[in-house]
Image (cartoon, grey):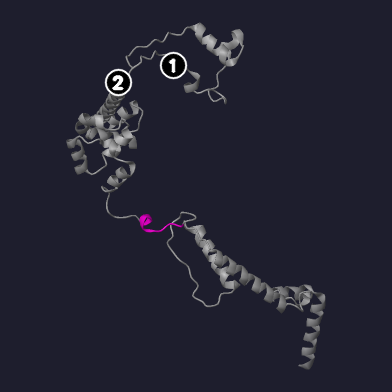
Amino acid sequence: MLDHQNTTIATTANDDTAAQTSYYGTAGADAGNVRYDPFAAGQLSAEHGLADIDTIKPRSRDQYVALFKKTEERTAKSTLQMCRVVYEAQQSLQEHEFADFCTAVGYKDTSSVIRKFCAIGKLQPRLVNHAAFMPHEWTKIYTLTQIPAQLFESYVAEGTDFRGLTGKQLKDLVDATRPETKQLSTLLPRDKDSNNFVFAKLTFDKTFVDAYDWRAVKKALAEVESRLPIKVQFVAAAEKAYQQTVAHRYTQAKQNARKTEFKPALWDFGIEAAQDNLKDDPADANTIDSSASTTKAIE
């Protein structure tokens, strides 16, 4: 393969039948009629299911190193040349023609891939003679085009290997070319449990808080949560305090209703409920009628 020699023997119709027969089992003459399902489970990958069809010519370690580097450089040059083609097409063709060109090569003219290809192609004349010191992946080459221009020029002029830059160094260099205005997210601390941004702190301005206050606060914050992209999280001490206020309120209610809990006639259902009960109760209606008659007699 490395010497451009291929010992592959062309397959025949019999070979295809044999492959189908071995894959589907002893199907005999009907093997060619079985429809292959590429999504069926339990299949072998190409890596494990196919054998090497080339003859390997043994080489020394140094020869393999030199061959690898040469191939890597050739790949980087091919990548740069491909991007240069896209860039020149963008500069030379009309807008609709360039859109047709992108469609023909399998991309959209508005895609980020085409935009990055053009960025690489613009600097291709500066990079092509430096291909031996560059990564061959176009995504990494594009990252190099985003570092400061002065540093980029010094690397090219001095013949420094771009591959010596670590991922963190590249990120810092790319960030150095961005505007200094910081986003709000970079200024806010993060919650260690949820990893969300913390932007507020709620406090009670009363020395005493009862269950009614707690309930009102919870309902109000729940309404805010439903309308805004925020998450209200009560601390453990606050939840414990809320439960204590609820328990205290419940205890007071039992003490105040000690003589009325089993006397429904004394329960307070509100004014409207009491009026409705008076209208529906015949005994109460008679009481009202007798009271009215007494009043008239006095008059």
Query: Going from the N terminus, do you reach mark 2 or mark 1 first?
Result: 1
Q: Nearer the viewer, residue 54 or 75?
A: 54
Residue 38 is labelled as none
Give the magenta range.
Answer: 184-191
Residue that appears at 34% across and 28% down: 103
Residue 110 position in % (x across, y down): 33, 36
How many discs mark residues in the rendered view? 2
Q: Nearer the viewer, residue 13 or 280?
A: 13
Q: Secondary structure at mark 1?
A: loop
Q: Is residue 93 visible?
A: no
State yes or no: residue 187 in magenta: yes
**Residue wearing tag 2:** 63
Residue 129 position in % (x across, y down): 20, 29
**Residue wearing tag 1:** 52
Q: Quadrant of residue 84?
A: top left
From the viewer's perspective, is residue 277 above or below residue 298? above
Is the residue marked by circle 2 packed among few (<14), some (14-19), or many (20+) residues within 10 Å? few
Q: Quadrant of residue 35?
A: top right
Q: Quadrant of the N terminus?
A: top left
Is the residue marked by circle 1 packed among few (<14), some (14-19), or many (20+) residues within 10 Å? few
Residue projecting furthest to the left: 157
State yes or no: residue 128 in magenta: no
The residue type indicated by label 2 comes to: Gln
Q: Is residue 155 visible?
A: yes
The residue type indicated by label 1 comes to: Asp
Residue that appears at 80% across and 86% down: 293
Q: What's the CA distance linking mark 2 and mark 1?
A: 21 Å
Q: Is residue 36 left or right of residue 248?
A: left
Residue 31 position in % (x across, y down): 58, 11
Residue that appears at 30% across and 44% down: 169
Q: Secondary structure at mark 2?
A: helix
Residue 175 position in % (x across, y down): 29, 48
